[in-house]
Amino acid sequence: MKLLENKTALITGATRGIGKGIAVTFAQQGSNVAFTYSASIEAAMELEKELESYGVKAKGYQSNAANYDAAQELATEVLKEFGTIDILVNNAGITKDNLLMRISEEDFDTVIEVNLKSVFNLTKAVIRPMMKQRSGSIINMSSVVGLKGNAGQANYAASKAGIIGFSKSVALELGSRNIRSNVIAPGFIETEMTASLPADTIKGWTDAIPLKRGGTPEDIANACVFLASDLSSYITGQTLSVDGGMLT
């Protein structure tokens, strides 16, 4: 039996990179998938078709997770279409890197809004239906940077560290309703975003990782499957580092 059979997942920012890896792996494990995207309608339609090829229901929604009202509306639409939301994966995120001396207020605020406030917006939107069904798994995407900081990423690190504190609080509030809240902290993951980095930069990073390679979106997706499924039914309020041993 597939691990996510008959479940419905809502995944934000799923048309590329880690988000896409999660969406595809969830579909392979039997989950229906509702996902959000910000710009590319074409990529969203392609992903819908790919997910449906695994025999599940899939639908993309153009929605801005950083907008509170849009997030509430999205949850209502997904519930109407799918009947339930069993899993929420807050994956949408951006970077606007700069040294603190040079970060503009706007770049600080935007990163906090997209990366952290979006997690509040969507978690708030799904907890009522999850409470009603007395089950749910919320998975929030942090980062190795949220655990150890990184020069030139004060805004990103603050947003990703905030996600960890938020998730622990949600775990404490909703545990009695059988709703679990956990965090995944990816390390260096090879995606379209990292493909443009110079080869020697990538080599410098991978050499410093005990497993001597970057991670793949599938590495993150497999950890998400574990936290979304009943295999982790006694795990909540935890941060799982998927980083090849980077923080060891």
Image (spheres, helix red, strand yellow):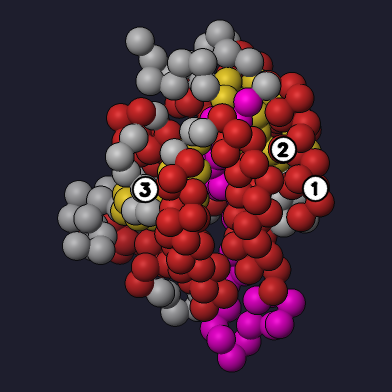
Determine whether, in the image, residue 123 is placed left or right of residue 187: right
Earlier sequence position, callout 1 versus callout 2: 1
Disc 3 residue type? Thr
From mark 1 to mark 2, how far is it between C-alphas?
Answer: 9 Å
Mark 1 crowd level (few <14, some 14–19, many ≥20, 10 Å Cα): some
Which callout, 3 or 2, points at the residue further toward the start of the chain?
Answer: 2
Mark 2 residue type:
Ala
Q: Is residue 102 visible?
A: yes
Label 2, on which residue? 75
Place residue 148 in its image quadrant.
bottom left
Give residue 199's position: percent from left, percent from top: 39, 56
Camera-near label (1 vs 3) is: 3
Identity of the residue drawn at 78% across and 31% down: 77
Residue located beneath label 1 in the image: 70
**Residue drawn at 81 percent across, 51 percent down:** 69
Residue corresponding to mark 3: 236
Chief secondary structure of the magenta span?
loop
Q: Label 1: state its secondary structure.
A: helix
- Mark 3 burial class by Cα count in 10 Å: few <14, some 14-19, many 20+: many
